[in-house]
Structures are given as structure tokens and as C-alpha cells.
Amino acid sequence: MSQFSLFPVPPYDFDVSARIFSGGDPAIRIFDHGVYRQALDIQGNPTLIEVRSTGTPDSPRLEVTATPGKEGVLAGDAVIQDVVSSMFNIYDELSLFYLAVQDDPVMVDLIHQFYGLKSPTTPTLFEALVDSIIEQQISLKVAKNIQVRLIKKIGRRLETGSAVYYCYPSPEALAEAPETLFRECGMTVRKGEYIKELSGSIVTGDLDLDKFRGYGDTARIIREMMVIRGIGRWTAELTIIRGIHKLDAFPADDVGLQRILSRYYRNGKKVSSDEARLIANQWGTWQGLAAFYFDVAEYLGVVP
């Protein structure tokens, strides 16, 4: 077992930031009674991560416990700390975001309600991309159910005492999975093909997702991701926000986001993709984070 403390850049409200995971599957990832818990495969070692806040938004402090599976092996403390810090983006400077959107009264009000909210990132870019493919053209609730089935069917197991957890499937596991497995999880044949082909390309070395982290130009990442079979603009933008944490990306084609923006900015009048981008332009390079604030408001039932 490994235990350590992290000191995020203030302001940071961990409880608010992790609340979107409160409805998760306890065997995979959940935030419950102030504790965030997730099974991760860190450098080939199944690891149960538990995070809780012992600080305040203006003086944040996180306590982290990393527990190995029955093999008893953990990655080094520095590696685990980097993974957790990156997942929660604890070093983001929210003060810069607040300054950038100060002329938008809608965002100012949301910031007041969710002071210290930072957006999380998936542990790997691969996970963000696969999840985004699964979520194409279906409701988020249905997509989450599919993701849970997929993880439990072929994700690596982690056993601690009498509890069993599941890590997100590796590219190798998804590349080798039979096509029928994707249908059993509730996916269309086409989506299963996309994920299996994507995973195979990573395993063979034909596709290096990590190269996108080194690109400064978000537009370039979008263009090159869209070359991958099954990846359109919406999927690329969502992946960039979730997996790379480039917050100048904005999923304007997201129907759910358009609906939310229509309530906040157009008195319920339908908002198109172009109109959504016009609204988002006022947030500068923080468009992805602003979109996350609206998603959280929707999830928590905040009504404008």
C-alpha cells in the first residue's frame, strides 16, 4: 500500500469536481461519502486508487491511498502521484479561467455555484477515445451501461480482500476480443469494428495516440484524429477535452450541450452548432472547461 498527500493549486473543490462520478459502478469508479475510488492499470499493475479531501477550496489538500491487487505489486510512488494529479488536473489555474469569462454573467453565476470545480481527465487518451466512440449518437445513460459491461467483460480484475474491481480494458484486450463481445455489450457492429480496428492499430504500432499530446494546435489534432476510421469532429473534440485536457476544444455538435445552451442563452430557442460556437467564442481558450461547467450543472439539476 502507498499513501501520500497532494496539494492542488487553489481554488479547488474536490467534492464538487468528483461529484459527477457519484452514480458510477462501485466495481469500476465511484465517488461515495467523500471518497473517490477507481481501479487502474498503472504500468501493468492493477491498482485501487482512493482519494479524499482534507482541505478547503482555498487551501486544498488530497489524501491518496493506492492498494495493489493480490499480486501485491505497485508502480513507484512518483508514477502513481503523476497519474492521480493528471486525472484531476489539480494544477490548473482556475483564476485565469474566472478572469477570462468575467464578462459573461451566465458563467459568472455558474462559477459562484461551483467555485473550485476542475474538470477531470481519463487516465489514458485511449480510454477517452473508446468512450467517445461508444457515446456516438446514443444517450449518455445507455453509453455508460455499455461501457460498464465492456469493462467488466474484459477489463483486468483487481482483488483486494473480498472486493473485486475492474480496470479499463487495454488496447491488447480489445484488439483480441471477438466481434460478438461488442454486440453482447450493446454496441452496433460498426462501433465494435471501429474500436477493434483502433485497438489493433495501437498494438501493431501503426497508431501512436500519445503523439497528439505534443501538438500545440488543437485544430491539427482534430484533423489527424478524423483520419482514424470512425472518428468525426464531435468524437475528436470530446476526446481532446477528456483525454488531453486541451480546453480550447469545444464539442459544438453535441445535441445535449446545444439544449443546455439554449436554456441559458436563448430562452429555450433551439441552438445550432454554429450558434453554439458563437456563444463559446466569448470564453476564449477555456471553451472546453466552460462546457464542463454546463454539463455539471445539468447533472446536478441546476436550472437557469
Image: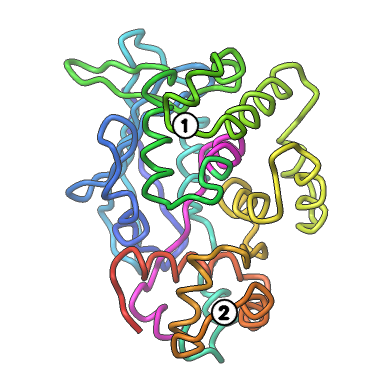
Three-letter residue code for mark 2? Val
Q: Residues within 10 Å of mark 1 (few under 14, many from 20)?
A: many
Disc number at residue 210?
A: none
Q: At 34% across and 63% down in the image, what residue appears?
A: 299
Task: State yes or no: residue 127 in magenta.
Answer: yes
Q: CA distance from mark 1 to mark 2?
A: 42 Å
Residue 246 image point, x, y percent:
65, 57
Q: Which residue is rendered at x = 60% and y = 16% of the image?
A: 172
Q: Nearer the viewer, residue 126 or 3?
A: 126
Would you identify the image quadrant in which residue 17 lies?
Answer: bottom left
Query: For this rendering, which residue is in front, 242 or 238?
Result: 238
Quarter of the picture containing the N terminus is top left
Query: Disc 1 designates what residue?
Result: 80
* Colouring method of the image: rainbow
Q: Secondary structure at mark 1?
A: helix
Which region shows up in magenta? 108-131
Query: Looking at the image, how many numbered discs can be counted on the residues?
Result: 2
The label number, if any, that marks residue 271 in the structure image:
2
The image shows residue 112 at horizontal and vertical percentages of 37, 81
Crowding at dot 2, Cα within 10 Å, few <14 / some 14-19 / many 20+, comes out as many
Left or right, 116 with respect to 251, comes to left
Mark 1 or 2 closer to N-term? 1
